[in-house]
Image: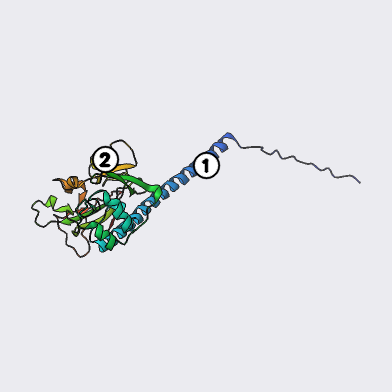
Amino acid sequence: MMKANIHRTHRTGRGGFTLIEMLIVAALISLFSGLAVINISQQLKLNQQKAAVAECRQIATSMSFAYDDMGVFPKLCFLKFNGPNLADMLQGTPVVNNPVFEVYDNQVGNLGQRLNGQWKGGYMSFNSDRLVKMNVPVANRDYDWPADPWGNPYVAYMLYSDPTEVDPASREKFIDTAGKSPNFLAAVVSYGRNRVPGLGENPGPEEAARKNLRLYTDDPGGDPRRFVLLDEAQLNGANRAERIDMVRIAPRAGQTDDPNSPRVRQTGADDRIYEF
């Protein structure tokens, strides 16, 4: 019996990729990696913005509670203290009528007695990793101050509208008496990623001028985590209304649109503002 001839074909296999295929794969990996990095970066930015809004809200709520108890708005650095500790801290200056405590250095009568009898704080705790140093000139010392995710100190805007002011541009002013109602605006503000009031993420040549609109200045010695709070004279100078970005936007619910009464906002700005 004859055996059938069996022809075996040996398939020639390719042992690797061509150079073009490798370049295509590398390009795809690079593309997807870049998209992943962009997505992570965008998510991080969004998370920072959300955190800033949440922290503005927390500080605003704490200031509201303190105002309800004391009848005045304190500086942000004091919100974490209880009454006796805060009274002891302020003993270095006349506690009976102490301007250090109030948000804009306004005199507060019988402060020591009021702290011991009315202050219910600490009203909030601060993230120790994000505290910066704020020099308060009227106290001639530095205090731990809450900062936003970009390292900017949070600031409080307490503005009242003065109907007797002839110049519309100067009608909105920082409260100049302890306990005065901020009937125009009460807000806690983060200056955002660009670190200046108003403008978007890339402020451009206007950045230097906008730094003069902040409620504090940079440390003269160049420490990036130390700042100097504006004192009462600087806030209440002739151009104090120009220290904030007065841009007209839609009025609040229930209010009419007064062209002489702009709001503290700018469309497209990266500031984070929580009004209360």
Residue drawn at point x = 31 percent, y = 51 percent: 77
Front disc: 1 or 2: 2
Nearer-N-terminus badge (1/2): 1
Q: Which mark is residue 196?
A: none
Which residue is at the far right?
1
Q: CA distance from mark 1 to mark 2?
A: 38 Å
Density class for disc 2 (Cα within 10 Å; few <14, some 14-19, many ≥20) is: some
**Which residue of the protein is positioned furthest toward the bottom in this rendering?**
254
Indicate the amino acid at tag 2. Answer: Glu
The image shows residue 114, relative to residue 142, as above or below, that is below
Q: Position of residue 11 (x, y in %)?
A: 72, 40
In the rendered image, the quadrant that contains the C terminus is bottom left
Q: Position of residue 59 (x, y in %)?
A: 32, 56
Quadrant of the rendered image containing residue 151? top left
Q: Can see residue 62?
A: yes
Colour scheme:
rainbow
Which residue does the image show at 25% across and 57% down from the upper left?
A: 112
Q: Which residue is mark 2?
A: 207
| Quadrant of the rendered image containing residue 108 | bottom left
Residue 221 sits above or below residue 82 on the image:
above
Q: Residue at x 28, y 44 (%)?
A: 141
Image mark for residue 29: 1
Q: Nearer the viewer, residue 93 or 193?
A: 93
Residue 276 in view of the camera: no
Amino acid found under the numbered disc labelled 1: Ile
Measured from the top left, where is residue 4 in percent x and y? 85, 45
